[in-house]
Image (cartoon, rainbow, N blue to C red):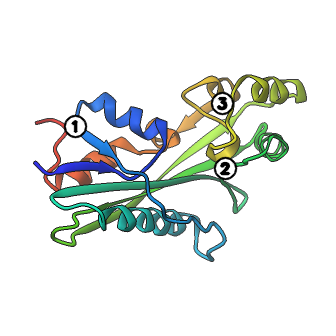
């Protein structure tokens, strides 16, 4: 089996893959994300994931490269990584009591054959109504400034959520069911 390369520095994506028991290495992409490209959210997620995958694929042989890009979308607006507490507070205030989509695009590339596969997954996330104290308390306890939508669902961010419709692993940043199915076509089978 070819070496699986995760083209991401995301600890959540790494944890998801580690839980499968499949061996892989991490090689973080140097690709510069541009969230301002005029594409529909799902297409943008695929486009950005492909840029990351191509960057890492150029450094590997006898490998299968997996890259992903995720963000939240609310009323057509992309909610990426807030980077500042003020922006995180603004995002969480906007999402309070609302439903938003969490979209992940992923790309798989075999650098030796040039074979590529890109896809997206969307999960609906419903936030409970949050008070200012809830938001401030959350931001004081969890550093979500480098996480799309300003929350980490697999950590304390779970208390902000009322329910989800769709794949939980997608909200963590890697839709494992879709990824596993696609990787099988590249000779990476989680069940063998």
Q: In the image shown, does 132 or 165 lie closer to the viewer?
A: 132
Measured Cα–Cα span from mark 3 to mark 2:
18 Å
User: Residue 157: image x %, image y %?
Assistant: 65, 29
Q: Pointer 1: residues within 10 angstroms few (<14), some, or many (20+)? A: few
What residue lies at 70% left-to-right and 63% top-to-bottom? 76
Tag 1 residue = 23
Residue 65 picture quarter: bottom left
Q: How many marks?
A: 3
Element type at mark 1: loop
Assign a secondary structure to mark 3: strand
Residue projecting furthest to the bottom:
38
Residue 81 is tagged as 2
Q: In the rendering, at what x and y percent does residue 192 appear?
A: 10, 36
Mark 1 or mark 3, earlier in chain: 1
Q: Which mark is residue 161?
A: 3
Badge 2 local density, few (<14 within 10 Å), some, or many (20+)? many
Q: How many angstroms separate mark 1 from mark 3 (CA)? A: 32 Å
Q: Is residue 36 above or below residue 64?
A: below
Which of the two labelled residues, at mark 1 and mark 2, occupies the earlier sequence position? 1
Real-space Cα separation, disc 1 to disc 2, in angstroms: 29 Å
Q: Nearer the viewer, residue 27 or 154?
A: 27
Q: Please give left or right for residue 78 compared with residue 119 in the image.
A: right
Asked whether 55 or 157 is in front, the reply is: 55
Looking at the image, is 164 positioned above or below residue 186?
above
Are discs 3 and 2 less than 8 Å apart at CB? no
């Amino acid at each position: 089996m070819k070496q699986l390369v995760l083209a991401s520095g995301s600890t959540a994506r790494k944890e998801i893959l580690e839980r499968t028991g499949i061996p892989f290495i991490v090689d973080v992409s140097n690709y510069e994300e541009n969230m301002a490209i005029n594409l529909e959210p799902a297409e943008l997620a695929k486009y950005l994931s492909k840029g990351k995958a191509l960057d890492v694929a150029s450094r590997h042989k006898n490998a299968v490269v997996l890259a992903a890009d995720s963000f939240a979308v609310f009323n057509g607006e992309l909610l990426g990584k807030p980077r500042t507490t003020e922006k995180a507070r603004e995002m969480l205030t906007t999402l309070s009591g609302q439903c938003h989509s969490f979209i992940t695009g992923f790309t798989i590339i075999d650098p030796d054959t040039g074979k590529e596969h890109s896809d997206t997954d969307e999960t609906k996330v419903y936030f409970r109504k949050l008070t200012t104290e809830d938001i401030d308390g959350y931001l004081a306890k969890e550093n979500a400034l480098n996480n799309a939508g300003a929350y980490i669902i697999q950590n304390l961010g779970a208390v902000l959520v009322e329910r989800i419709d769709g794949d939980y692993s997608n909200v963590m940043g890697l839709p494992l069911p879709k990824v596993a199915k696609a990787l099988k076509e590249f000779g990476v089978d989680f069940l063998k």
